[in-house]
Amino acid sequence: MKKKDQLTRRSLLSGAIILTALVLAYAPIPGLRQAIVVVSGTELQEPLQAMEAKFKQAHPNIDLTLKFQGSQELVNKYLNDQNDFKPTVLIPANGDLLKELETRWKTQNNSDPFQEAPRPIAKTMLVAIAWAERGKALFPDGSFRWERLEQAMQSGSWDKLGGQKDWGSFDFVMTDPTRSNSGQLTLSLWLQSKLGGTLTAAELNSPNAQSLVSLVKRSVYQPPRSSDALLQEFIVRGQNDADVATVYESNVLYRWQQSATTQGKPYQIYYLNPTMETTSTAAIVQRDVDSGKANAAKQFLDFLTQPEQQAVFVQYGFRPVNASVDLQSVPNSPWRQNIPGSEVKPATQIVPLPDASVIEEIQRLWERSN
């Protein structure tokens, strides 16, 4: 019996050792599990949420939390340490906002704010949209014109613009330029058209610049804080309360079907010429981020730039930063859906984004205007 007991004990011990080995092999090892918080501009909210489960499945040792803010708001809150969480990665709507953050951070802290050079994730451009009948009345030749938009705001009603009297007042929608990148780009392009040439902070103090910004601010009622919020509001309000808007091509393409379903008639896309292209760019921050978190964050950014995830961005209306991904070959690509006005290669000039001093002056102009 003794020998049999010894064999039983040995079998149990061997089984326990094997079970322990299996647990160690497949369970997360203490100390290697990392939690990262990614703060993105709201324009990437839906594609990032769509990819979240796949990333977590592929990286079970990384706890990913996604947060979303307006891009300018994102920068300001990080610099002023106003979040109730500790960001690991920041992804504003364009890389220039990260340059602004870097400049302001170095002034305040005399150190680098980022772990490594920021990485491009996905890109889009600023476009205009209008409900079909309104667009034909405002832009009869099919081309967007800033001066026609200004005339519409000055006249205030559609019957003075070649539209029908029962269309009522003219309503333009844009985002708040103190909180959102698309609002900043809208005013930058509009002021460039009005003043001619590249903007400088000095030119923005001219009477022409001040009168235009004042006109726009009086005409835009409670501008939304983000582009996607703007577009959803534009669709819900419909053509009696929202006529023309400036917003990102990505939002416009992705929500086009929603506009057709909600309002019965879809909106028309107008490519601005010139326009500005904005690249959502990711940076791993230094503050409160150790090497383990930084490595987990790098895995997340590697994941986002792989062809499979770049194709997801395309499905949400973004243009890929990975050259191997073709807009029209991606399944469910909006560029295959015959959306009115959409173009794979629009004949528009892409001009440089305004520098930080110009953006700051535009924000001051907006805040001072009434």
Image (cartoon, rainbow, N blue to C red):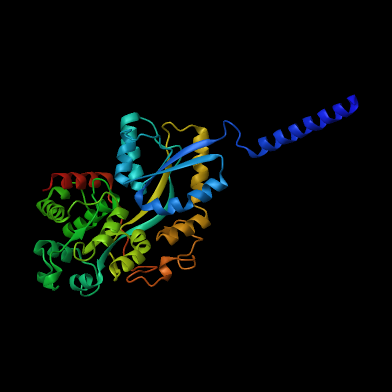
> Residue at 18% across / 44% down in the picture?
364
Q: Position of residue 204 (x, y in %)?
A: 16, 49
Number of labels in the image equals 0
Write down the quadrant of residue 139 in the picture.
bottom left
Q: Position of residue 8 (x, y in %)?
A: 83, 30
Q: Is residue 198 at least partly visible in the picture?
A: no
Q: Is residue 306 above or below residue 161?
A: above
Write down the quadrant of residue 74 in the picture.
top left
Q: Position of residue 189 (x, y in %)?
A: 24, 57
Q: Is residue 194 above or below residue 284?
A: below
Left or right position of 256 against 207: right
Write down the quadrant of residue 81 in the picture.
top left
> Residue at 23% across / 54% down in the picture?
188
Position of the N terminus, as image quadrant, is: top right
Q: Is residue 43 at least partly visible in the picture?
A: yes
Residue closest to the far bottom: 141
Please state which of residues 294 and 199 is positioned toward the viewer in this rendering. Answer: 294
Left or right position of 250 against 141: right
> Residue at 31% across / 32% down in the picture?
107
Left or right position of 248 against 115: left
> Residue at 19% across / 56% down in the picture?
191
Residue closest to the far top: 2
Residue closest to the far front: 1
Q: Position of residue 121 (x, y in %)?
A: 44, 51
